[in-house]
């Protein structure tokens, strides 16, 4: 099983906000490459704003996001930092639906990354 670190510093969250972003019904997934030691595994951060609801609702959403990310631990790239931003819909969305959405979001983030690197390679060869 892959060990996952937790993002704790505000600067890490702000850096992830400048990276790629995939919006889904129950969450927003942000990802950015990092220069830290890859042997430590991927780093994840969770956040839910006050606009989503009161403290028990926000905490429940974060618990659901943590459980979701544990199931997909192998899919997270160790060279990236990720932030999952909980949305109001995550509170009532079926867990299987959240799982499908996270699987698609991770695929899309990693496919975009490889497509972007291929485009850069083609430009440098020209």
Image (cartoon, helix red, strand yellow):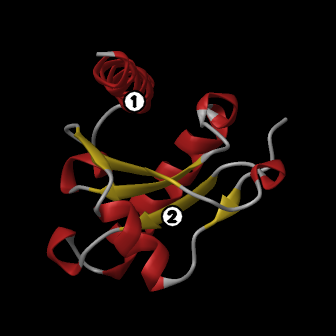
User: Where residue 3 sits: x, y (%)?
Assistant: 80, 49
Q: Is residue 4 left or right of residue 123?
A: right
Dot 2: few (<14), some (14–19), or many (≥20) neighbours within 10 Å? many
Residue at 14%, 75% in the rendered image = 51
Q: Residue furthest toward the left?
A: 51
Q: Quarter-wise, where is residue 13 in the image?
A: bottom left
Residue at 35%, 31% in the rendered image = 94
Residue at 69%, 62% in the rendered image = 36
The image's mark for residue 126 is: none
Earlier residue among tags 1 and 2: 2
Q: Are marks 1 and 2 in contact (CB under 8 Å)?
A: no
Residue at 30%, 20% in the rendered image = 119
The residue indicated by pointer 1 is 113
In the image, residue 53 sits, relative to residue 26, either above or below, namely below
Q: Is residue 4 left or right of residue 16?
A: right
Q: Quarter-wise, where is residue 99 in the image?
A: top left
Quarter placement of the C terminus: top left
Q: Residue furthest toward the front?
A: 126
In the image, residue 38 sits, relative to residue 36, either above or below, namely above
Quarter placement of the N terminus: top right
Dot 1: few (<14), some (14–19), or many (≥20) neighbours within 10 Å? few
Q: What secondary structure is marked by label 1? A: helix
The residue indicated by pointer 2 is 45
User: Where residue 47 sits: x, y (%)?
Assistant: 38, 69
Q: Quarter-wise, where is residue 109 in the image?
A: top left
Viewer-side residue, 89 vs 45: 45
Q: Is residue 11 left or right of residue 77?
A: left
């Amino acid at each position: 099983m892959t060990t996952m670190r937790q993002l704790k510093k505000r600067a890490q969250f702000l850096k992830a906000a400048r990276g790629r972003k995939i919006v889904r019904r129950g969450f927003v997934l942000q990802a950015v490459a990092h220069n830290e030691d890859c042997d430590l595994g991927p780093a994840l951060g969770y956040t839910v704003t006050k606009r989503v609801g009161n403290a028990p609702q926000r905490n429940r959403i974060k618990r659901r996001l943590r459980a979701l990310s544990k199931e997909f631990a192998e899919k997270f790239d160790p060279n990236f930092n990720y932030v999952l931003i909980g949305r109001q819909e995550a509170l009532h969305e079926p867990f299987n639906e959240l799982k499908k959405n996270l699987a698609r979001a991770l695929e899309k983030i990693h496919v975009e990354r490889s497509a972007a690197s291929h485009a850069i390679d083609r430009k440098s060869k020209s």
